[in-house]
Image (cartoon, grey):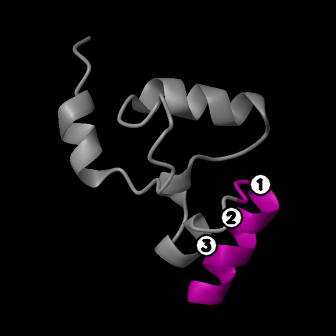
Amino acid sequence: MECKKDKNLEICGCTYEDCSRRGTCCDCIANHLKSKQLPGCCFPAEAEKTYDRSFEAFAKAWALTS
C-alpha cells in the first residue's frame, strides 16, 4: 500500500507541528490507541488544541457540538 503522507498533511487537523507521525495516519492511530487515546484528527478544532486525546475528552467534545 502506498503512503499518502503529502495528501494527508493537507487535511491533518493535528496542531502539534513537531510530531514525527503527522501525515502518516496508520502510525499516528496505532500510537494513540496504544495509549488508550484518539488522534487529534478525531476532535473538533477547539478540543484538539487542548492536547487531551482521551476517550473521555472525545466524548465530551462531541457532546458539546450536538
Answer above or below: position of 18 versus 63.
above
User: Can residue 55 be found in the magenta stretch?
Assistant: yes
Q: Residue at x 35, y 35 (%)?
A: 23
| Percent of width and height locating residue 47 | 61, 72
Q: Which residue is mark 2?
A: 58
Q: Give the residue displayed 46% in from the left and 53% down from the top.
A: 14
Q: Which mark is residue 31?
A: none
Region of the chain picked out in magenta, as a range: 52-66
Q: Amino acid at mark 3?
A: Ala
Q: Is residue 33 above or below residue 3?
A: below
The residue type indicated by label 2 comes to Phe
Residues under numbered marks 3 and 2 in contact, where contact means CB atoms less than 8 Å apart: yes
Secondary structure found at label 2 = helix
Tag 1: residue type? Ser
Majority secondary structure in the magenta region: helix
Q: Nearer the viewer, residue 34 or 10?
A: 10
Q: Quadrant of the N terminus?
A: top left
Residue at the disc numbered 1:
54
Residue 19: percent from left, percent from top: 51, 36
Mark 2 burial class by Cα count in 10 Å: few <14, some 14-19, many 20+: many
Disc tally is 3
Q: Within 10 angstroms of label 1, few (less than 14), some, or many (20 or more) residues?
A: some
Q: Quadrant of the C terminus?
A: bottom right
Residue corresponding to mark 3: 47
